[in-house]
Image: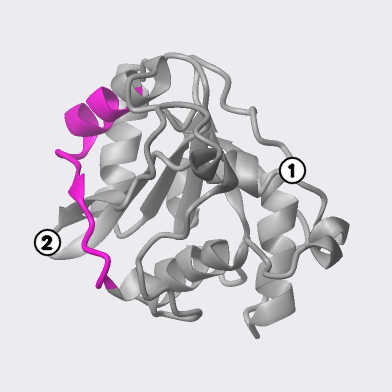
């Protein structure tokens, strides 16, 4: 694993892995702003099938389109999770009936294990900022765009009692897809939950 925290975006062969290009800079800014974690000023993109993925404690994967991993990508993801990495997957469609959700959850099940609801009492929600009600709601859910559901839980895959995959149907990729300078327009910074994900990945 790398010594300083570097935001790692996963590139996979299918779909549109690069659909949220502003998220890395925004989360990097928040980690630097709120914590004492040494963070690299720019993120990296790492192919899912590359052994370089094993260097990063947290990897972010998103998209809108159908996801089909190659056998190499499945093997590398399985090894990554077994070695202690945390894969954070966010559905950029926020739609449980959508093609990304259906195909990506199938691939996660094949590579790592079955997803299950993550209790809203999980340490993830209290490891830095406190989210008493679990995962914060996104504006897209509140506006009824997508599947017209407010998703009360995130999902996860546990390996030996450790969270190895964190899966979101809430579309944080859209919620956090703005330039960090625009945080001044928000009464409450909506990227704070991203800080929790980073802190949890580094300290669990």
Is 203 placed left or right of 198 in the picture? left
Mark linked to residue 22: 1
Is 165 placed left or right of 23 in the picture? left
Give the extent of the magenta segment.
104-122
Residue 2 in the image: above or below residue 93: below
The disc, 1 or 2, on the residue closer to the chain's N-terminal end is 1
Is residue 46 found inside the magenta-colored segment of the image? no
- Residue that extends furthest to the bottom in the rendered view of this protein: 36
Q: Position of residue 80 (x, y in %)?
A: 34, 47
Q: Residue at x 28, y 54 (%)?
A: 164
| Nearest to the observer: residue 146 or residue 105 | 146
Q: Residue at x 64, y 28 (%)?
A: 18
Q: Residues within 10 Å of mark 1 (few under 14, many from 20)?
A: some
Whether residue 80 is visible here, answered yes or no, is yes
Is 96 placed left or right of 4 in the picture? left
Residue indicated by mark 2? 160
Judge depth for marks 1 and 2 and give the one in front.
1
Asked if marks 1 and 2 touch (Cβ < 8 Å), the reply is no
**Looking at the rendering, which quadrant does residue 71 occupy?**
top left
Whether residue 11 is visible here, answered yes or no, is no
**Secondary structure beneath disc 2?**
loop
Q: Position of residue 134 (x, y in %)?
A: 35, 65
């Amino acid at each position: 694993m790398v010594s300083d925290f570097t935001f790692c975006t996963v590139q996979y062969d299918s779909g549109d892995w690069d659909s949220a290009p502003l998220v890395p800079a925004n989360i990097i800014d928040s980690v630097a702003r709120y914590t004492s974690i040494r963070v690299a000023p720019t993120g990296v993109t790492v192919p899912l099938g590359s052994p370089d993925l094993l260097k990063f404690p947290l990897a972010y994967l998103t998209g809108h389109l159908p996801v089909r991993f190659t056998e190499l990508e499945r093997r590398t993801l399985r090894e990554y999770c077994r070695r202690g990495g945390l894969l954070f997957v966010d559905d950029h469609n926020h739609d449980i009936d959508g093609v990304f959700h259906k195909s990506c959850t199938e691939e996660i099940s094949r590579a790592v294990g079955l997803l299950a609801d993550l209790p809203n009492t999980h340490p993830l929600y209290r490891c830095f900022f406190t989210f008493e009600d679990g995962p914060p709601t996104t504006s897209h859910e509140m506006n009824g765009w997508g599947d017209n559901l407010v998703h009360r839980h995130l999902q996860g895959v546990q390996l030996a009692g450790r969270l190895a995959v964190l899966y979101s149907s809430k579309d944080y990729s859209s919620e956090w897809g703005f330039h960090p300078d625009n945080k001044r327009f928000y009464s409450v910074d909506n990227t704070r939950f991203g800080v929790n994900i980073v802190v949890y990945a580094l300290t669990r």
